[in-house]
Structures are given as C-alpha cells and as structure tokens.
Amino acid sequence: MSYFVYIIWSEKNKKHYIGQTADVENRLMEHNSGKSRSTKFGKPWLLEYTEEYATRSEAVKRERFLKSSTGWKQLKEIYLNSTRTEIP
C-alpha cells in the first residue's frame, strides 16, 4: 500500500494545507465536504501537489518536515518549479 503527502489550496482563504493519507481522492472529498475540522471553512480545496511513499511513517515524517521552517523553504522550491510562481 502506498501513502501520500499532499498539498491542497483554498482560493477562498488563500491558504494551503499539508497532509498525508493512503487515499488522496477520498481525503480531498472529506476536506471539501466539511468533515475535516481544520479545513471546513476553506472549501473548495484544490489538490496542488502529491508525493508517494512506501510506508505511512515515511509520509508522516515528510509531512512534519514540510510543515517546519526548513521544509517551508523546500515548499517554495516545489512551487517555483510548478505552475505557481510563488507559495501562497
């Protein structure tokens, strides 16, 4: 089974959210249905980025890293190399 780290974006709140899951489509549906307390006010959420890992512990480790100050710098690089020109 694969696990994923994902980044979603709320145009409404101009914020992003970083999480990890085994089922990205289902998790995005949960965010957009209001089932997730931390994201229910930012609907609709758009999936912007995913990374795949072999174990949940690897995905959790990466999620925590991306939420750190050093990880924030790496996120800027991810966004600069994607369709966005800067991290929101």
Image (spheres, rainbow, N blue to C red):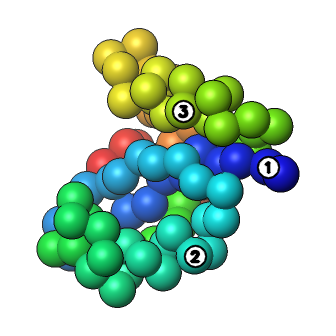
Earlier along the polypeptide chain: callout 3 or callout 2?
A: 2
Q: Residue at x 54, y 60 (%)?
A: 48
**x, y percentage for residue 52?**
75, 44
Give residue 43's position: percent from left, percent from top.
27, 79
Residue contact at pointers 1 and 3, CB within 8 angstroms:
no
In the picture of the structure, the residue carrying the numbered disc 2 is 26
- Residue 68: image location, x then y, percent: 35, 20
Q: Is residue 62 left or right of residue 69?
A: right
Give the residue displayed 42% in from the left and 77% down from the top.
Answer: 30
Indicate the amino acid at tag 1: Ser
Residue found 63% across the figure and 29% down from its top: 57
Looking at the image, residue 41 sits to the left or right of residue 76; the answer is: left
Residue 21 appears left or right of 2: left
Which class describes the residues within 10 Å of circle 3: few (<14), some (14-19), or many (20+)?
Answer: some
Establish if 42 lies above or below 16. below
Q: Secondary structure at mark 2?
A: helix
Which numbered marker is on residue 37?
A: none
**Label 1: few (<14), some (14–19) or many (≥20) C-alpha neighbours in 10 Å:** few
Tally of numbered discs: 3
Q: Is residue 59 visible?
A: yes
* Residue topped by disc 1: 2
Q: Give, as a three-letter code, the residue at label 3.
A: Val
Of callouts 1 and 3, the N-terminal one: 1
Q: For mark 3, give the secondary structure.
A: helix
Q: Residue furthest bottom?
A: 33
Which residue is more in the foreground, 21 or 8? 21
Q: Which mark is residue 60?
A: 3
Residue at the image point whose x is 22% and y is 59% from the top: 38
* Mark 2 Cα shell of 10 Å, populated few (<14), some (14-19), many (≥20): few
